[in-house]
Image (tube, rainbow, N blue to C red):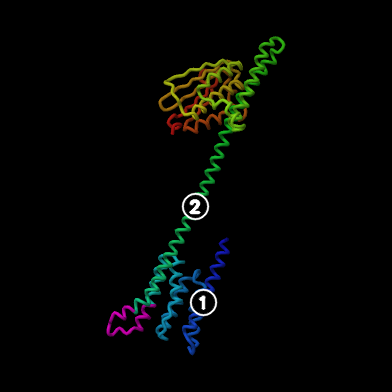
Amino acid sequence: MTSTGVLSRSVLGDIALAFAIFVAALFASGGGQSAWLYGLIVVGTLSLALRRRFAVPVLVIVAAITAFAMVQYDSWWPFAALIAFYSVGAHCARRTAIVAGTAGLLLLGTAVAFEIDWNPLGWDDVALMTGRLAPIVAAWVLGENMRTRRAYLEALEERAAQLEREKEANARRAAAEEQARIAREVHDVVAHNLSVIIVQATAADAVFVSDPDDARTAVRTIGRSARRALAELRHVLGRGDDHELADYAPQPNLGRLDNLLDEVRLAGLEVELEREGPQRELDPALELSAYRIVQEALTNTLRHASANRAWVTLRFDLDALDVEIVDNGTATTTADANGGRGLIGMRERAATFGGHVEAGPDAAGGFRVAARLPIAAAGH
């Protein structure tokens, strides 16, 4: 139900309540009363229809009329006052409700006290005073409790809505991060294998007539690279049934780095691998990122550097893994020709673990890529 529907029901309910109190007041007053009294009954009861929106003015009107009727006509009829005090407690801020309720109670208490014969003072007088004012106080307390409960429920609803918004935001962020991860994996898989395929296809075409055996070897390398690229793409995208996925190789790690370097060597780039420091098992995600950084750097070398040699160094420190790739090509052309997408991907991978990537011309010539991947962050 909409808030407009709830509001309409509340207004209709208040009107019905005010009319019911009006009818009850007419019956309670009996016949033969003055026109003034009937006018006060009309104002003092029908004003309750506005008790939610104008709680304090309604309380002032009802309390004043009730006190006047008590003093002028010796008539104590508190039912309209009970509704007014409840409304102030339920629909006004606490400080406003306390001030208005105290003022109204003093007004009614003065009127009741004025009609009691306090001489001699006895317990009956105190009981009469208490009996008339206690329901008024109880109505105010009940309204205050309802206001507190309503505020508590609204806070719970707001908290639930906030949690739902946070959940949706987290889901969108997780989806964006997963899309970025898949994009990096697809880029690295496709770029590397296509680079190998292009190099081997070029070599096969060059020796197709003069050296058929070398051409056949290059074609077989193209086939292996294409099949491996397809398998890795399916693995990244999670496609295929469980039986097919079981046949795919697991995500690359540093243990498979030698296979990667063999493929690069077949493409015509001599690569040397050096490992420094005590080697140990690392977080699989960190090893995958290190592998992809090496793969992307060598792919860039194959595609853009006009290099014939490259050196890969892995340094295992206590708190970080350092990965360095240096080639002897043309430094100015080793950076990505497509706007640096590969370098951006490497930096994103390193940033995932709180690390960084440096890329630029090497002091000895060629191009250098150096990545530092904190191990502690990966473990956490």
Placement of the C terminus among the 4 image quadrants: top left
Residue 202 occupies which quadrant of the picture?
Answer: top right
Q: Point out residue 61 in the picture as x, y percentages from the top left corner.
A: 46, 77
Q: Amino acid at mark 2?
A: Ala
Is residue 306 within the magenta segment? no
State the residue at coordinates (57%, 61%). Answer: 1
- Where does label 1 land, which residue? 20
* Residue that sits furthest to the front in the current view: 243
Instruction: Write the start and end of the magenta stretch as one range.
Output: 108-127
Which residue is situated farthest in the top direction here? Answer: 210
Q: Is residue 44 left or right of residue 188?
A: left
Q: Give the spatial CA distance, label 2 vs label 1.
A: 39 Å
**Numbered-mark total:** 2
Looking at marks 2 and 1 on the same chain, the residue that comes earlier in the sequence is marked by 1
Helix, strand or loop status at disc 2: helix
Can I make out residue 245 in this image? Answer: yes
Measuring from the top left, give residue 257's x and y in whole percent.
Answer: 53, 21
Rendered view: 96 above or below 290: below
Between 6 and 268, the residue placed more toward the observer is 6
Left or right: residue 185 versus residue 86 is: right
Mark 2, residue position = 160
Report the disc number at residue 82: none
x then y, percent, for residue 91: 46, 66
Task: Reply above or below: 339 against 69.
Answer: above
